Image (cartoon, rainbow, N blue to C red):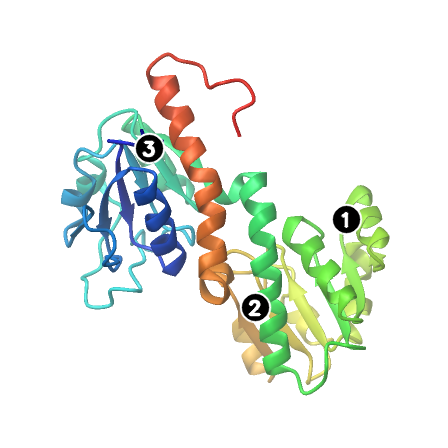
Amino acid sequence: MPELDGVRVTLLGGDRREVELARILYRLGASLTLFGLPLPSELSRARAVADGPSAVAGAHVVIAPMRGIDREGRIPTILVPDLPPVALDDRLVGELAPNTLFLVGQLRQPLRKLLESRGLKVVELAHLDEVAILNSVPTAEGAIQLAMEELPITIHGAAAVVLGAGRCGLTLAQKLVALSAAVTVVEPRPERQARAASLGCRCVPPDQMEAACASAEVIFNTVPAPVLDRARLESLRPETLIIDIASEPGGTDFEAARRLGLKAVLAVGLPGKVAPKSAGRILGQVIPRLIREHLEMQAGQPAEEGAP
């Protein structure tokens, strides 16, 4: 019997990685409903629904976009542009039964509280190490691709600064070093500094960030906080390129960058843009296990020891 046979799963919007995820869940036997996504022809038993509340009614599992819900609480449906915007609101959440598993990339606190007040089990996938570490690869590759497109020089030999040495920052630094960039990592935590140094990077604490960035040809920000404010931007060379891959709204004052004539790009959702099949397969590695563990817990059966 397929692993997810009979499990009612609704995918609420997203991009091409969710389409790939739908294929994987379908092969595992899930009973699929898609909202805000094109229905692949090979998913003959799946259904596409144009109404958000109807799509989630009766679902055991709801999967919202990995890219998250937008700042207005609306569900991104970029692959079905003619679909009217639908919000994650009381009407939609009211169709969900208590104990429904709700999976999403990231969620603002008010929306999380709304879901949890209904008794839903909420999992933010971007906060899971196994997802974030695997996702850091297409994110880093996408950021470097953007840099290659925007810079008038090669990455080889370029003075590159990476702000933050978390999961994405370290992967990005590693790939830049492999391309022979001169990489400086700005990071406050000594253990992360040590990890970046082991990759061949120069490491400095945040109080040396301005000096490090002043000579940079490209700056990659991974910190979801306002680290590149106007004062810091004013110290940059006019030709410096900024690629901000932190979660929206990023860590750059983009309006100040525009006024100063700096090229600054907010590059969110890179895995879904540059490597959607790989990104969908990453979700397909993790989400079936999360569903199985949730259902076993609901049934009072502990997950099998050693299960992947």
Other-residue count near label 3 (Cα within 10 Å), few / some / many at <14 / 14–19 / ≥20:
few
Outermost front residue:
1
Element at label 3: loop
To which residue does mark 3 refer?
2
**What amino acid does circle 1 point to?**
Pro
Categorize mark 2 by other alpha carbons within 10 Å: few (<14), some (14-19), many (20+). some
Q: Is mark 2 on a helix, strand or loop?
A: loop
Give the foreground label among 2 and 1: 1
Q: Can residue 31 be seen in this view?
A: yes
Under tag 1, what secondary structure? loop
Q: In this view, does 153 lie above or below 136?
A: below
Residue at point 45% right, 58% down?
Answer: 277
Q: Residue at x 33, y 33 (%)?
A: 2
Q: Is residue 110 above or below residue 47?
A: above
The quadrant in which residue 173 appears is bottom right
Disc 3 to disc 2, C-alpha distance: 49 Å
Quadrant in the rendering for residue 13: bottom left
Q: Residue 28 placed where, x, y %?
A: 34, 38
Between residue 260 and residue 278, name the one nearer to us: 278
Residue 224 in view here: no
Q: Which amino acid does label 2 sit on?
A: Asp
Numbered circle sitting on residue 253? 2
